[in-house]
Image: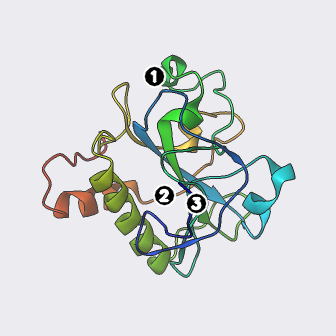
Amino acid sequence: MPETNRTEYDGAKWMRSPNYDIGRGGAGPERLEVHLLQGVGGWFQNPESGASTHYVVDQKGDVVQCVREKDTAWGNGRIEKGAKKWWNKTGNPNRVTISIEHVKSARDNSNQLTTAQKKASFKLIANIIKRNPWIKPKWADDTGGITGHHSISPKSRAKCPGPFPWDELFQYLNKQGNQRFIKKT
């Protein structure tokens, strides 16, 4: 089936990245990974970057999809020493995650998401979980869930995603009327 410009999330624009693997190597997404970066521009469209995530949420709240959810984006890197132990059983963390980048202006990820960005991100996360019920809508552990990049790369990405509003996210997910949503412990 030929690829179309249609996104999986109705609120997103399609901006395909060449940096991904077709399929997930027999795995399926069990975690949703949150990232922050200073700016995306054409980075994910550049084959030499070797990087991509499934979605990007900019500071105005615009959502861009770069890789299909059924495919493996290249946003998580290698599992570093000190990573959460549950990553060790996954092999390649890219194969078991749907990744979302959030554009920020600070190089050190120290600034907060904008109000528009937070609203768009929360809606996107709830939608991804609704369409992918095997992603557990809870703080990540060995059975899956939602986490930040720091859980994979505690040395090189210790501040990713920076000051993310985790408590607000779980409150938002709980208000969606689905009792499966569990707050961070």
Instruction: Left or right? Give the position of 24 relative to 17.
Output: left
| SS label for mark 2 | loop
Residue 136 drawn at (x, y percent): 30, 40
Q: CA distance from mark 1 to mark 2?
A: 22 Å
In the displayed structure, 180 sits above or below 28; it is below
Residue 79 versus residue 154: which sits nearer the camera?
A: 79
Quarter of the view holding residue 74: top right
Residue 146 drawn at (x, y percent): 40, 44
**Mark 3 touching mark 1, by CB under 8 A?**
no
Chain-order first, disc 2 or disc 3:
3
Q: CA distance from mark 3 to mark 1?
A: 34 Å
Residue 122 versus residue 96: which sits nearer the camera?
A: 96
Q: Residues within 10 Å of mark 3 (few under 14, many from 20)?
A: few
In the displayed structure, 110 sits above or below 10; it is above
Q: Amino acid at mark 1?
A: Trp
Q: Nearer the viewer, mark 3 or mark 1?
A: 3
Quarter of the view holding residue 166: bottom left
Color style of the picture: rainbow
| SS label for mark 3 | loop
Query: What residue is pinned by disc 2?
Result: 164
Give the residue at x 61% y 60%: 66
Which quarter of the figure is the C terminus placed in?
A: top left
Chain-order first, disc 1 or disc 2:
1
Query: What residue is pinned by disc 3?
Result: 3
Q: Nearer the viewer, mark 2 or mark 3?
A: 3
Query: What residue is pinned by disc 1?
Result: 86
